[in-house]
Amino acid sequence: MSGHSKWHNIQVRKGKQDAKRAGAFTALSRAITAAAREGGGDINMNFKLRIAVERAKAVSMPKDNIQKAIDRGTGAGSGVALVAISYEAKGPGGMDIIVDCLTDNKNRTASEIKHIFTKNGGTVGAPGSVGWNFEQKGVVVINPKSKNQMPSQAQSSNDQTILKIMDIEGVADVEEDEDGIEIYTAPKELAMVSRALEEKDFKIEKAELVMSPKNTVKLEGEKAEQALKLLEALDDYDDTENVWTNLG
């Protein structure tokens, strides 16, 4: 029995690891597709695509998957024009949600998005119904920490790094968390700031446009559980590119 139990535990652990890896591949594919749609499929001319592809390669995402994600963004090979469309909605507890989709059939996607919201306690609204509560920003994420540094050394190093970053033209704000340092810019200055960071030898983990909420809400109990189910359903939907909320 112990042998069976050990094998079962290995299977469960491997299943969780595979699921986590598949989730990472899905997120990276969406990032690659979005970058290719926005700036074209040439990584030498599209810095956001180059960064997304580098992140995908770092986690051993297959080359075929990467190319398919690029082709999906550019429409190459499919013969079908992909259209970007966003939906604004209210979720459980009055939370604001924006869902960015990439689709070859707007009517199908609209119907299926509405079904997901209706099934999970939400309502799709008209354009502008919640968009006023979000501001588009550019964000660049870097992680300058060294594995060999003590916490106090790392903090001192990060403080110096932040001061250096704030001197870069186009940087609007800098925030630090456990995942690294987030640098905020105006949307049009994202590429310029990213290039400036690379010129200073910073390793960029991510560079993207985000929808940042102006006012946030906190949910608890049943409403929080309902919101989680809704967000998971939206994230699992094939046409979804990004889901933005004002959850605090």
Image (cartoon, rainbow, N blue to C red):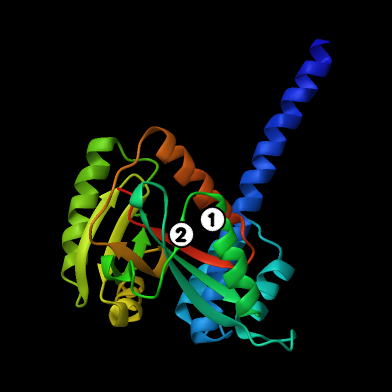
Horizontal and vertical percent for residue 177? 30, 47
Dot 1 and dot 2 residues touching (CB under 8 Å)? yes
Residue at image point 59% right, 84% down? 41
Indicate the amino acid at tag 1. Thr
Q: Which residue position holds label 1?
A: 118
Q: Residue at x 35, y 53 (%)?
A: 95
Q: Residue at x 61, y 55 (%)?
A: 236
Quarter of the figure with residue 74: bottom right
Circle 2 residue: 123
Q: Which residue is nearer to you in this view: 23 or 213?
A: 213
> x%, y% of residue 163?
16, 60
Q: Is residue 145 visible?
A: no
Label 1 Cα neighbours within 10 Å, binned few <14 / some 14-19 / many ≥20: some
Q: Quadrant of residue 188?
A: bottom left
Q: Amino acid at mark 2?
A: Thr
Q: Is residue 139 left or right of residue 226?
A: left
Would residue 5 be found to the left or right of residue 57 on screen? Answer: right
Q: Residue at x 32, y 40 (%)?
A: 149
Instruction: Count the marks.
Output: 2
- Residue 200 or 138: which is nearer the viewer? 138
Image x and y of residue 229, in percent: 53, 45
Quadrant location of the N terminus in the rendered image: top right
**Whether residue 230 is situated above or below residue 87 in the rendered picture:** above
Report x, y in % for residue 247.
Answer: 34, 50
